[in-house]
Amino acid sequence: MSETPCHTDGALTAPAPAWTKRSNAKDARRLKARELRSQGMTYDEIRAELGASKSSISAWVRDLPKPAPRWTEVERMQRLDKAQTAFRKGRDDERRRLTQEATQQIGSISDRELLLIGAGLYWAEGSKDKDYARRESLTFINSDPRMIRIYIRWLKLLGVERHRMRCSLHIHDSADLTEATRFWSELTGVPVEEFLKPCIRKDNPGTNRLNRGESYRGCLRIYVTNSARLYRQVEGWWQGITDWASAPSADPPSGMV
């Protein structure tokens, strides 16, 4: 078929030669997408290769047969497990890195800092005096050895000697009471024979709690004798901290993170 001349301002002009026509870039991508799909590529792989949207790729290649699975079900599960393992490792590595960086920010702690830490720690975890239940004495209970260690350092700062500490365990009957007592005795310096009668809680049949593994040693309760005066001081220290936080002129956080 011969090409029809074009009219421009009433004058006849010859059509542009075929070699001057530019190829449609979208058509080229469509053809390339079909080629890649025929080679067995997934939509995501084609998108990464061409930079086209997934909806466009779908419109271009939907009439082509779906590629056969590249892996067996066993191979697919192995690849998935490998990817999940790599993800968890990266997450755990990042967690350790951030924890180590934060640990290095602390360094040594002054007596004043320990005083404030201990006051906050006690007011969060220790027994408090109530109008309906007078308890003006230091009584602290926790299952975390690190918390107990800090608490004992704080008591030492306050001048509390070991002989004023009365320790007892709150523990489930499925645990090894003897081993738990030995552990807390070594951590606190209070001899095993000086521990008070433990409070043993009976487990319900069939209980399988995840927090009762080999490291479970119950909760340690530390009562300090003749500590009413100390308790009132702790209450005052905590009040001072809260007064500072409530004051309009309180310095804003420095933004360590």
Image (spheres, rainbow, N blue to C red):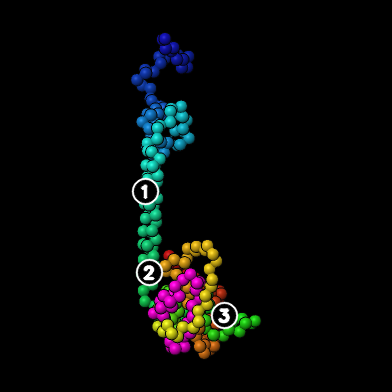
What amino acid does circle 3 point to?
Lys
Residue projecting furthest to the top? 1
The residues tagged by marks 2 and 3 sit, at their Cα atoms, a distance apart of: 31 Å
Quadrant location, the C terminus: bottom left
Q: Which residues are the magenta region? A: 157-186
The residue to which callout 1 is attached is 82
Question: Image point 56% across, 74% down: which residue?
Answer: 246
In this orientation, does residue 19 appear?
Answer: yes
What amino acid does circle 1 point to?
Lys
Residue 216 percent coordinates (x, y): 45, 70
The residues tagged by marks 2 and 1 sit, at their Cα atoms, a distance apart of: 31 Å
Q: Nearer the viewer, mark 3 or mark 1?
A: 1
The residue to which callout 3 is attached is 128
- Residue 173 located within the stretch drawn in magenta: yes
What amino acid does circle 2 point to?
Thr
The residue to which callout 2 is attached is 103
Residue 115 percent coordinates (x, y): 45, 81
Quick one: label 2 or label 3, which is nearer the N terminus? 2
> As displayed, is residue 94 above or below residue 30?
below
- Residue 158 located within the stretch drawn in magenta: yes
Q: Residues within 10 Å of mark 2 (few under 14, many from 20)?
A: few
Q: Nearer the viewer, mark 2 or mark 3?
A: 3
SS at circle 3: loop
